[in-house]
Structure formats: structure tokens, C-alpha cells
């Protein structure tokens, strides 16, 4: 009986630990609408077009209600076992990275790197899910209440995986963070269940990313050129590699020619064991780097270019 009890406790402990290991890493970020409508924005010209982007740093420094509400939302999620990245700390990390890369330019044109604030923040924070939060504190006579819209966005694909919206009950004394807590608590179980379903799917079926294979114009070869001992076309070799390395061989070759291959719905593993036997997280860069190394063994030089967290280009012919 004691042995049976010990076995049951051990299994329960393992399952509990496994469930905790599968929790997604979250980061709460104010929505574009919230920032821009309140003047926390950056406006600049991009190829003749006026572009407006949110300024998260100014928003956090200037809006005490936003800071309190984000802190409360983080606490609500942490109480339910979801690990969090702190927006303010990640903004500081981003500032440091910008300072370090301020002199980094293209070797050919002298151009600086182009990246939107949210893409840069996603890349630095490495969060799985962005909690896109929009709220407004309204008045009803002497009382206040909060209206909110919360979306869970996959940081790699920008797809919405969970969402909830609603309004709280009016209160004469409650602070903004308490108004938010009262408004969202009744919705959080369904919201968190949606997040967990998405993350469970990623562990079972892989994280979804995009990969583009392209060819430098001066290479002298293309994707119809034959390589390897079997003299197979390069496009077929690459297609076979994706079949062998995607989770459950799940990917979609949506378009292709002699000069490019576009892979979508590419399911990459969340974790892998490295050459030293260590479990390591897999992202788009490390996954496509494995393809680059594989092609390098066939004498094909290539350059890896990342477009945000969830998309990578591998350009064949030279670095």
C-alpha cells in the first residue's frame, strides 16, 4: 500500500511539473490604439508614406494608470501560473541593444536596420504570447468603471489565440488596477484555457513559422541545379529536409520557382537535444541555421536573414 501511494504521488509530481513546464511566457503590452489615441506615438516618413507607431517607453513613463493596470494584469496571470516578462525591464534591455547596434549598418549601402517597435520588443523579450491590452476608465456620475479589450497574440505569427472584452461594475472608490481586476476575473478562466490550448498545440504539433529560400543573382546556380551523390534538384533536397525536420513533417510549400521557395505553416519543435545532451529551446533562427549547415556540407554558402521572430530567409550563393 505504501509503495502504491508513493508511486501515485511520484506520478502526480511528474505530471504537475510537466504541466508547469508547458506554460507559455507572456508579456503584457498596451495596444496600438491605446498608445496612439493618447499621444504616445512616433510619426515618421517611410518611403514617402507617413507611418505612426506606438511609443511604449513614453506611455509607461507618462501614464500612471497604464503602469498600474499592466502590473495588475501581470499579477493576475502570475497567480494562474503563467510566467511573465516585465514590459519596463524589456524596454530597458531594448534601449541597451539599440545603443550597442547604433553603429551597425549595411556593408554595401550603409543602410540602418529597419524594425517596428513591437517586432523589436518581441525579439528582445522572446515571449511566446503578447497580451495586447486596451482599456478606458469611464465615469457614471460620481462612480468610475473600466471597459477593457484583451487579446492573446502568438508572438511568432501575430495570430490571435485568445480574447476577451467586457466592462466592470461602477465604483466610487476603486483604483484603476482594482477596477480592472474586478472586470476581468470572471473572464480569465476561459481566456487562460485558450492560451493553454494554443501552447499545448505548439508542444504537440510544433511552433508555426515561415521560411523563404531565395537565390543571389550572381550565384550561377539555382534551385533546379543538381547536387549530391544522387544528383537531385536542390529544391527537392530542401523539400526533403523540411519533411525530415518539421514536427510530424508538417509544412506547406505554398509557392516555388527556380529562384525561390516559400514555406508556410512550418511546424518547428519547441525543444531539442543538442550535441552535449542538453535540452534547448528552438526558434526560427536555430531551425533555419540547421538547414544552412546542412547545405554548407554540400558546398552551398548561404546567408540567414531574420524578419521578426517568426520568419526567416535563407539566401543561397554567398553570405
Image (cartoon, rainbow, N blue to C red):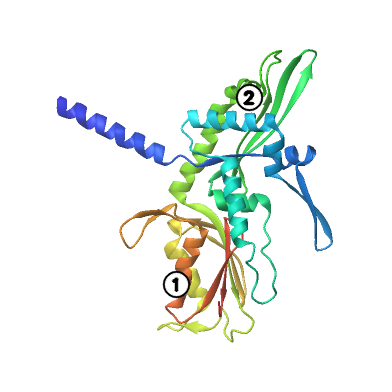
Element carrying mark 2: helix
Residue 168 in the image, given as x and y percentages of width and height: 68, 20
Examine the image and state in which quarter residue 32 appears.
top right
The first of marks 2 and 1 along the sequence is 2
Residue found 50% across the figure and 32% down from its top: 78
Query: 77 or 3, which lies in front?
Result: 77
Element carrying mark 1: helix
State the quadrant of the N terminus.
Answer: top left
Query: 29 or 80, which lies in front?
Result: 29
Residue found 38% across the figure and 56% down from its top: 272
Query: 130 or 107, which lies in front?
Result: 107
Q: Does residue 268 appear in this view?
A: yes
Where 44 falls versus 179 (above or below)? below
> What residue does disc 2 label?
177
Residue 35 in the image, given as x and y percentages of width and height: 74, 40
How many callouts does the rendering have?
2
> What residue does disc 1 label?
293
Examine the image and state in which quarter residue 38 appears.
top right
Residue found 65% across the figure and 71% down from its top: 106
- Labelled disc at residue 232: none
Where 64 falls versus 29 (above or below)? above
Residue found 50% across the figure and 42% down from its top: 25
Residue 231 in the image, given as x and y percentages of width and height: 45, 84
Q: Is residue 272 left or right of residue 174?
A: left
State the quadrant of the C terminus.
Answer: bottom right
Give the CA distance from mark 2 to mark 1. 50 Å
Q: Going by the picture, which residue comes out furthest to the bottom?
A: 220
Q: Does residue 156 appear in this view?
A: no
Amino acid at each position: 500500500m505504501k509503495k502504491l501511494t508513493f508511486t501515485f504521488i511520484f506520478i502526480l509530481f511528474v505530471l504537475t511539473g510537466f504541466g508547469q513546464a508547458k506554460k507559455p511566457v507572456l508579456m503584457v503590452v498596451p495596444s496600438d490604439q491605446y498608445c496612439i489615441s493618447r499621444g504616445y506615438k512616433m510619426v515618421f516618413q517611410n518611403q514617402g508614406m507617413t507611418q505612426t507607431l506606438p511609443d511604449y517607453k513614453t506611455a509607461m513613463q507618462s501614464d500612471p494608470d497604464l503602469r498600474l493596470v499592466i502590473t495588475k494584469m501581470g499579477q493576475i496571470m502570475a497567480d494562474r501560473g503563467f510566467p511573465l516578462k516585465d514590459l519596463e525591464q524589456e524596454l530597458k534591455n531594448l534601449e541597451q541593444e539599440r545603443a550597442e547596434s547604433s553603429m551597425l549598418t549595411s556593408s554595401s549601402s550603409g543602410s540602418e536596420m529597419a524594425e517596428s517597435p513591437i517586432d523589436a520588443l518581441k525579439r528582445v523579450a522572446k515571449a511566446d504570447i503578447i497580451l495586447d491590452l486596451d482599456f478606458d476608465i469611464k465615469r457614471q456620475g460620481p462612480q468610475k468603471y473600466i471597459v477593457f479589450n484583451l487579446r492573446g497574440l502568438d508572438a511568432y505569427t501575430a495570430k490571435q489565440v485568445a480574447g476577451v472584452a467586457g466592462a466592470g461594475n461602477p465604483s466610487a472608490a476603486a483604483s484603476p488596477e482594482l477596477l480592472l481586476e474586478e472586470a476581468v476575473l470572471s473572464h480569465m478562466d476561459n481566456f487562460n484555457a485558450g492560451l493553454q490550448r494554443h501552447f499545448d498545440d505548439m508542444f504537440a504539433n510544433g511552433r508555426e513559422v515561415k521560411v523563404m529560400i531565395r537565390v543571389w543573382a550572381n550565384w550561377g546556380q539555382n534551385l533546379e541545379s543538381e547536387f549530391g551523390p544522387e544528383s537531385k534538384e536542390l529544391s527537392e533536397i530542401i523539400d526533403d529536409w523540411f519533411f525530415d525536420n518539421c514536427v510530424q513533417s508538417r509544412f506547406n510549400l505554398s509557392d516555388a520557382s527556380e529562384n525561390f521557395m516559400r514555406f508556410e505553416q512550418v511546424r518547428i519543435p519547441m525543444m531539442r537535444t543538442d550535441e552535449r545532451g542538453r535540452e534547448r529551446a528552438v526558434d526560427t533562427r536555430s531551425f533555419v541555421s540547421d538547414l544552412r549547415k546542412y547545405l554548407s556540407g554540400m558546398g552551398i554558402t548561404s546567408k540567414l536573414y531574420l524578419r521578426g521572430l517568426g520568419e526567416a530567409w535563407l539566401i543561397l550563393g554567398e553570405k
